[in-house]
Amino acid sequence: MSLEKYLNKDTLKSFILVTLGCFLFSYTINVLVIANHFGEGGITGLTLLGYYTLQIDPALSNLILNGFLLLIGYRYLERKTMVYTVLAVFELPTFLKVTQDWPVFVPENLVVAGVAAGVLVGIALGLVILGKGTTAGTDIIAMMMHKYLGWSVSSSLLMIDFIIVTPLAFVIGFEKAVLTLIMLFIASKVINFILEGVNPRKAIMIISDKYDEIGQRIQTDLDRGITVLDGHGFYSKEKRQVLYVVVSRQQLMPVQRIIHEYDPEAFVIITDVNQVIGEGFTFYLDDNGNKLHH
């Protein structure tokens, strides 16, 4: 088996993303979370519980607990995911040790620290998952829930984190426990944005007598493909043409202006789209980065 299959741009990109994510996560834990006596979710929350109560080194407990979950996770996750997860399992405690004595950030207003920690943790975990890895721990459980239950990664993490933060509340106090939950909520939204919302899409259905003029303008001005659906009113039985188009968030307002220009009374439905696979947006790729056709 040739090494060239694994040593490619995609592998390098994943390695960089996972490493950056692990470093940023470890930095945030030491400089913001521990410094302000916050809690955390997942395995990190358990390591902080051990640190606050028994002074157990977070780097050591993190390695032990994540290593244990890694033994479970290999049965459920794909080979590539496991490779980058193993990388993360060793990088996290290493970076936790490296950044342990770095200058901390303790603002007068703890809300500032909580928000900052939430954003940075979200970016960190988002980068790791974007790099096809996990930070082990409850990330493995969250990805298993995503794979087998269809739950979003961010929602799964938030639920697990809530369960883990509950006992931490008795150690760090109610106020900081609430700030921890706010931090975790912000982190989940940032993760969601990185995984699903970096290139957000909107699906638009347009019902109008001026469908032809509207469709032509959208196609000409925005270079977006449009599907024409045949429909009819349930009550009137009148046949109507329905335009269906998927656009980026930046193209949403121009589309609305075009519709209003031709038919201010058009019936328009706009919905969020988590992912689009296809020409003009993205494709499924194989391990070598080649387009897959279905």
Image: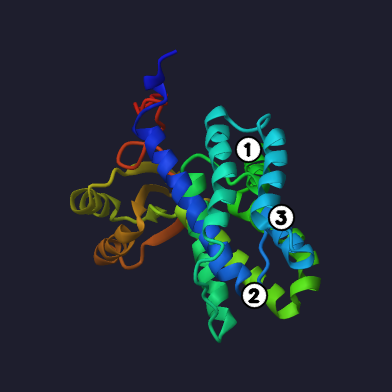
Specify which label sits upstream in the sequence, 1 or 2: 1
**Residue beneath disc 2:** 179
**Residue beneath disc 1:** 147
Q: In the rendered image, is residue 175 in sight?
A: yes
Q: CA distance from mark 1 to mark 3?
A: 16 Å
**In the image, residue 178 lies at what x, y percent?**
69, 75
- Under mark 1, the amino acid is Lys
Number of numbered discs on residues: 3
**In the image, residue 141 lies at what x, y percent?**
68, 44
Q: CA distance from mark 1 to mark 2?
A: 30 Å
Q: Is residue 34 left or right of residue 10?
A: right
Count residues near mark 1 (Cα–Cα under 10 Å), then give few for <14, some for 14-19, many for 20+.
some
Residue sitting at x 67%, y 57%: 58
> Is disc 2 in contact with disc 3, using a CB cutoff of under 8 Å?
no
Check disc 1 and report its element: helix, strand or loop.
helix
Residue sitting at x 62%, y 33%: 77
Image height of 258 relative to 79, above or below? below
Q: Nearer the viewer, mark 1 or mark 3?
A: 3
Q: Nearer the viewer, residue 91 or 180?
A: 91
- Under mark 2, the amino acid is Leu
Residue sitting at x 54%, y 73%: 115
Q: Which mark is residue 38?
A: none
- Under mark 3, the amino acid is Ile
Q: Residue furthest left?
A: 220
**Residue beneath disc 3:** 160
Specify which label sits upstream in the sequence, 2 or 3: 3
Which quadrant is home to the N terminus?
top left
Which quadrant is home to the C terminus?
top left
Q: Nearer the viewer, mark 1 or mark 2?
A: 2
Count residues near mark 3 (Cα–Cα under 10 Å), then give few for <14, some for 14-19, many for 20+.
some
Q: Residue furthest top?
A: 1
